[in-house]
Amino acid sequence: MKEDAPEIVFERVGKSFPRNDGAGGSFEAVRDLSFTVRRGELLAILGRTGCGKSTTFNLIAGLLRPSSGAVRVKGHDPFAEFDWFRGRIGIVFQNDRLMPWRTAFENVELGLELNKVDKMKRAEVVQSWLERLGLAGHEHDFPHALSGGMRQRVSIARAFATRPEILLCDEPFSALDEHTGNTLRDEFRALLAETGATAIFITHSIEEALALGGRLMVFERPARIAYETRLHAAMTERDRDEVRANIRRSLAA
Amino acid sequence: MGARLSEPVATTADAAPRRGFRYEGIVAFVGLAVAWQAASYFFPDYLFPPIPAIAARFFEIFASLGTTLDALATAGRILAGLAGSFVLGGIIAVLMAKWPAFERYSLPLLNFNQGIPALSWVVIAIIWFKGIEFRIFFIMVMTTLPAFTFQLLDAYRSMSNDLYEMTLSFRPTRYDLLRTLIWPAVLPGILTAWKVNLGNASRVVVVAELVGATGGVGYQLLLQQQLFDMAGAIAWTLVLVIFVLIVQMIITLIESHALKYRAVSERSL
């Protein structure tokens, strides 16, 4: 694959779910959605609750099959070729989703263990990630003994430890207080820059999307692109205000 | 990076205060023994035998090889029956979880089975099978099967979908999924199922042995009834109760080791 070749491709993707209200019919979560994401790009997807952000996320993750159109990630179908993506995709979920029976160390180790990484190498990698995310000394703590911020950092370490080529984040800092969220966001951006991973970041916060930088898309319901822009370091506060206003208009539509 | 954002919110289960020695249970049993002993002064021995007579009969059981083997036979039957029921119930639970059509057909049969008294299975087993051990095994399995199946199915279904999706995101093999997620998630349910069914099995095995066996606690209880020997009947009952308590203690030990990750609330202590 060429350096600037699209890493993620959505081609007129639609996704419907059957209604469970007994009346039959279906609910359309994604309609005719097309976009591409290049290697190393950070794409923030914004949208109101229920606009299909998470469905789009699950389509990329290979957890859902599109009803129409095609999803290609690194040239492969993430649903049909599920196992091909072992070690290639990392996910940070909205809630930490730590296994309660595993310590912080063992939770970070999970992806490496499933990728059959040698035990010695695993220990080295896990320890380095725990230290980088300020969790040294908590290796043997079970999740219930950690604060919300610490648990979320364990889940970030778990996703990064496998050094995935594609990182999917579903509102990972939304449940945290502002200070913790901001600090983790900065750490997250630094890690992305360092690993060069392609990242999709789902959020419902305009400020978070602006703080992340990179490319930004606003979804309208059912998931379609209502607004799209690219943020860059040279943008003035006035430019940002304009982007902010455009996002608000798109969300209100 | 590296600065601590927040402090841990709770102590780990290991560091949390544990339950201390509970003397209330011993006081309750001593009280019961005193009341029984007092009753023995006012009633004939065949109604309320004195505590020393019961203790003597209890130790007699383990002084003779024949009666010790009777006690061990019952213990073995309980464990074999539970193991068989656990395996069969586990298979049925997996099939029910995997194929809804299988569940639709098997659920009514399991519910129907729950309504069948243990004594009916004893009669059926005696008519159907010749071997005593197989009869008892069959009775044990048939009576504890629905509870095991329902509890294992429930444990599987209550597994967190969030954790399932998270684990799937790493593309595990089937074996790895079972090892890292399913087994630890259903283990508390399995241990609870064993604890609950152990009590049921100890009641059922006595009924099965009472009617269909030539040895074991149930057979010995029948013998004591024919001899009108209350001390013997209570001593044999104690053998069974002590066995159940020992197995429950073992399960609790396994539980406290395997489920040590669970949070312990100081208020609940």
Image (cartoon, coloured by chain):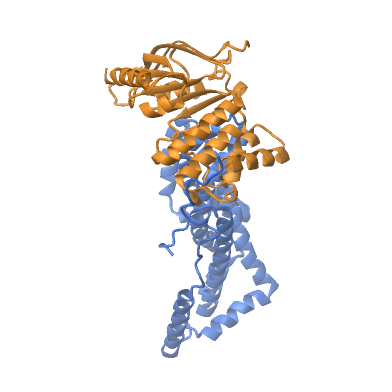
Chain colours: A orange, B blue
Spot occupied by residue B38 in the image (x, y as percentages of width and height): 43, 88
Q: Quadrant of residue B219?
A: bottom right
Which residue is drawn at the image coordinates 58% and 65% (left, top)? B246
Which residue is drawn at the image coordinates 40% and 29% (left, top)? A208
Spot occupied by residue A109 in the image (x, y as percentages of width and height): 62, 39
Spot occupied by residue A77 in the image (x, y as percentages of width and height): 55, 15
Numbered disc total: 0
For the question of whether residue A250 can be seen, the reply is yes
Instruction: Give the side of residue A53 with respect to residue B225, left or right.
Output: left
Q: Quadrant of residue A46?
A: top left
Q: Is B45 situated above or below B175?
A: below
Instruction: Give the side of residue A215 with respect to residue B173, left or right.
Output: left
Q: Is B134 situated above or below A48?
A: below
Q: Is B52 situated above or below B243?
A: below
For the question of whether residue A204 can be seen, the reply is no
Spot occupied by residue A16 in the image (x, y as percentages of width and height): 38, 18
